[in-house]
Amino acid sequence: MRAPSDIAAQGTGGVGDSPLRPDGTLKVKGEFAYSSDLWVEGMLWGATLRSPHPRARIVSIDTAPALAHPGVHAVLTHEDVPGVKHYGHDLTWDQPVLAIGEVRHQGEPIALVAADHPEIARRALDLIAIEWEILEPLTDARRAAFDPTYPQVQQRPNPARHQPVRLGDVEAGKALAEVVVTGTYEVGIQDQAFLGPESGLAIPAEDGGLDLYVATQWIHNDLKQIGPCLGLEEDRIRMTLSGVGGAFGGREDLSMEIHAGMLALHTGKPIKMVYNRYESFFGHVHRHPAEMSYEYGATRDGKIVYAEVEILLDGGAYTSATLNVVGNAASLGVGPYEIPNVAIDAYGVYTNNPPCGAMRGFGAVQACFAYESMMDKLGEACGIDPVTIRQINAAKQGSELATGQILWAPNPLKEMLQQARELPMPPSLDVSDIRNLPGGASQTTHGEGVRRGVGYGVGLKNICFSEGFDDYSTAKVRLEVIGGAATVLVHSAAAEVGQGLVTIEAQIARTELGVERVVIHPADNAVGEAGSSSASRQTYMTGGAIKTACEAVRERVFSLVASHLGRTLDDLSLVGGKVVSESEGVLLSIEDALGDDVIEETREYHHHPTTGMDKVTGRGDSHTQFGLCVHRAVVDVDVELGLVKVVELAAVQDVGRIMNRLALEGQIHGGTAQGLGLAVMEEIVVKDGKVRNPSFTDYLIPTILDMPPMRLEILEHADPRAPYGLRGAGEPPTLSSTPAIVAAIRDATGLALNRVPVRPEHITG
């Protein structure tokens, strides 16, 4: 069987350096083993029958013709689920493993097939006969939220969550307002669009348990759902992370894991499942679409005195992460600005539209597009430029957010905005090279009708899990001499999903233990929980766990040294493979200190506690840390054809501490690219509950030709509560890039543009 092996960190480098990624060369050369590459002798292929309807009753289902097809080993329905028939996040286990009597969204799984060959499995799916009673899909999110006569999508009532936030007295603020601006905004459904499809391998074990090799973001959370559904205790399921081809939140929910497990347990044979691209669009959740209404009042000099906000998020058929996305959208609904009087109402609802859940930015993206659009609109109404209007209202260290939470860490937003404004501008449009123009080599213009625009965006994103969740990570660190060289083995369940975590893990171990040779154990559930690779949290949380475990190992090394020397020294450190005393210099090598001893320590790392949000006022210290990014976008727009070329994106981001500049810049570039996609091209188009563009032919994502050069200014204002003072960095650029680009398009065209993605017809009318 091809499966992940231990990853030996390449090159050298501790915290602050930029060593090469140990998986980088393999990925570039196409030699890295992703979950879709797994293979074992004698395995069968699994496939899933999915609903073509967004809402329908299953009158009858006949699996006999499929089961009789040559090469088919099993056909399973919900009646064959060996344990609990529903799963989900937290306590909201409302998603059926396989449909029970009714389907609530297009693509809902109904039946499973195991066969000798994937094509046989697909043919067998076509032989499953279903008699349907087609029902009218419930797709109006606004009616679902506010119309009590609108039918319920499922047993859980609408709205799934309503989270108010109240600060001050909005009516009193209205009496002070000299300028009032309003806006309504929409965000379409964005897909994570990871390149590696949902896939994995389930192998039945001799003890009646299961070995699962899957691509996921959160091993232990998957395990808590898989075990009950398969009727297995957690210790009888051994989960190992396989190669993950991107995630961005889309792998926080289960896809094929329970299904493959069911087929493996039923047939007694290994089962491999791989979705194709079409199925992948139905096999995972997406970013919540949003409808938002905002009203801001300010004094004539631009100081905001009140904000009134409504945010409506469509979660689709099942809960997934909707409850927490609503909390994020509510708590960050007016961004990093001082506003004394605030009324926010955020809602998440059930419909028969595609299920939505976690995606990079997690509720903050939608709100950011709206509040940043409002800042531009307010600035225009007050006759104040976009940077200055933000500086006038910028929160700072000690400011109170809408939830009452105090920004106790450094928050240099005013300075960041100024830096963004002062960065050099790109050269003027050169029409002599057609590739510089909107439309590029398609020769849609030679410069006529092309106008340039500049826009700014600011994004405030919470880091780590929030609202009282006991967020922690576990790491085991082992130090021993192998082949004459001190070697560190780092073991955690944290998922490497392409963000470069394995590189950072090795850097921390090198820094703390002074050992160059570091091996990263494959992530699995043989070690304690590490939480999800999401919320920009893993360097903070698993990095903190590794650092803490390394410190414990180091203290034991010092104890060994004291035993060797016959005395205790208080000024020891591990540097370059040596035990060094500040007063006496190099004492001995780590290898000599260890001898045949093996030191192993396991530690949990918890960030400082958060609180829930009050159900009526939203008050509470609901977040651990905040990440801040400022974008400046420069665009050229062909106003006659509605084509947009993003000329340059500049970003100023405070990361607390640069752990690995190369990886960090990659995260800023990548997050910005996803924000660009949302701004001008990415949307799952849904009509009457049905997805119209489930392919990369029709769902467009930015390519290297769409992503412009970037200027980066990276600041290091340390967060004293975080390991090394770092701030999570992966998500903030996704927030601020979208409104910056749309603001630049507005600047070029003079149009309001209240919806993303901006399409050509929005520009040409």
Image (cartoon, rainbow, N blue to C red):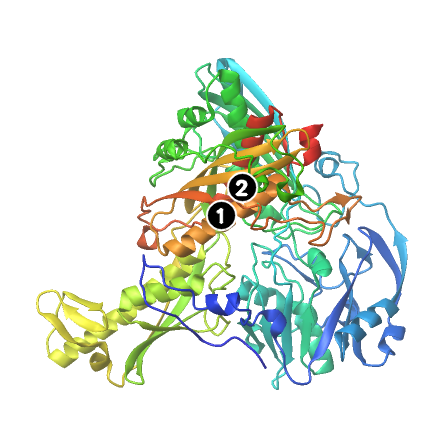
**Callout 1: 10 Å neighbours few (<14), some, many (20+)?**
many
Q: Is residue 354 visible?
A: yes
* Relative horizontal placement of residue 460, taking residue 509 as reference (left or right): right
What percent of the width, then of the height, locates residue 563?
16, 79
- Pointer 1 and pointer 2: residues touching (CB < 8 Å)? yes
How far apart are the two marked residues, 1 and 2, measured between alpha carbons?
10 Å
* Relative horizontal placement of residue 113, taking residue 395 as reference (left or right): right
Which type of secondary structure does the marked residue at label 2 adopt? helix
- Using the image as rendered, state which of residue 81 and residue 657 is in the foreground: 657
- Using the image as rendered, state which of residue 115 and residue 157 is in the foreground: 115
Q: Which residue is mark 1?
A: 731
Q: Which residue is mark 2?
A: 364
Quadrant for the N terminus in the image: bottom right
Q: Looking at the rendered structure, which numbered label has been put on residue 267?
A: none
Three-letter amino acid code at disc 2? Ala
- Using the image as rendered, state which of residue 67 and residue 748 is in the foreground: 748
Q: Residue at x 45, y 72 (%)?
A: 527
N-terminal-most mark, 1 or 2: 2
Q: Is residue 229 visible?
A: no
Which type of secondary structure does the marked residue at label 1 adopt? loop
**Callout 2: 10 Å neighbours few (<14), some, many (20+)?**
many
Quadrant for the C terminus in the image: top right
Image quarter for residue 13? bottom left
What percent of the width, then of the height, locates residue 574?
22, 69
Which residue ends up furthest to the left in the rendered image?
A: 584
What percent of the width, then of the height, locates residue 762?
68, 31
Is residue 684 shown above or below 481? above
* Relative horizontal placement of residue 374, taking residue 510 as reference (left or right): right
Image quarter for residue 488? bottom left
